[in-house]
Image (cartoon, helix red, strand yellow):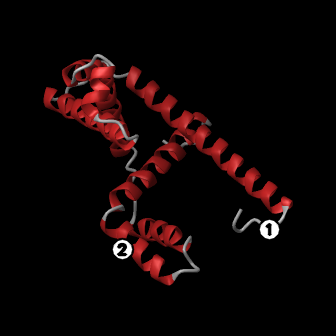
Amino acid sequence: VEGLETVESLREDIRQNLEKAAENQFKQDVFQSGLEEMTENVEEMLYPPAVVAQEVTRMVEDMKGRVTRSGMDWEMWLASNERTEEDLQDDYEEAAVDQVGRSLVMQQFVQLEQLKVSSEEFDAEIDKRVGEYDDNPEMQQMMKQFWVQSGGEMIAQELIYDKVYDRLLAIYAGEAPD
């Protein structure tokens, strides 16, 4: 394996990867349970039906992308599963309603808690990601351009999720200032 010269370095790399995976799973669990708890406490949620329809369409398109990336023809996949796109839309309706609800709750939480990503935090995250290519200046420049132009929204969303996680953890631990 490139970059792993000894058994010890391989073990250390595996240990670090396992720790990171466990940390990410814990973070995801806290995030999901917090979001579910907040969603359960909402008495009434109002949103236009078009938002749910848009989410259903996104879910179907996501499935279509996964199927075609796996090498299957979309129409053949539908036929082999005895489904139509309309069937999938019906199947995804409830999940789409749940997703829209969770998104609205999270947006409200972010707004109420006044969670924001500063330009300094954003730039630092881009620098961190670009720094992974420190041995290749050309790749660094390419990746910086990608993250600024195309991946910026994804980075901002990840940073907000991190802030939501940190805030939820502080709330659960009883350490969150009011």
| Relative to 161, 60 lies left or right | left
Q: From the top left corner, tell me how far across and down residue 33 is, in percent.
A: 51, 29
Q: From the top left corner, tell me how far across and down residue 160 is, in percent.
A: 42, 51
Q: Does 167 sit above or below residue 155?
A: above
Residue topped by disc 1: 5
Q: From the top left corner, tell me how far across and down residue 112 is, in percent.
A: 35, 42
Please say whether residue 61 is visible from this viewpoint: yes
Which one is in front in this view, the residue at disc 2 or the one at disc 1?
1
| Residue ID at (28%, 28%) | 76
| Residue ID at (36%, 74%) | 145
Q: Quadrant of residue 87?
A: top left
Q: From the top left corner, tell me how far across and down residue 15 is, in percent.
A: 76, 51
Q: Which type of secondary structure does the marked residue at label 2 adopt?
A: helix
Residue topped by disc 2: 145
Q: Residues within 10 Å of mark 1 (few under 14, many from 20)?
A: few
Q: Does 34 sit above or below residue 125?
A: above
Q: Which type of secondary structure does the marked residue at label 1 adopt?
A: loop
Seen from the viewer's position, the closer of residues 109 and 140 is: 140
Q: Residues within 10 Å of mark 2 (few under 14, many from 20)?
A: some
| Residue ID at (42%, 79%) | 141
Seen from the viewer's position, the closer of residues 175 and 45 is: 45
Tag on residue 88?
A: none
Please say whether residue 96 is visible from this viewpoint: no
C-alpha gap between disc 2 and disc 1: 33 Å
Quadrant location, the N terminus: bottom right
Q: Does 156 sit above or below residue 176?
A: below
| Relative to 117, 131 lies left or right | right
| Relative to 96, 158 lies left or right | right
| Residue ID at (24%, 33%) | 55
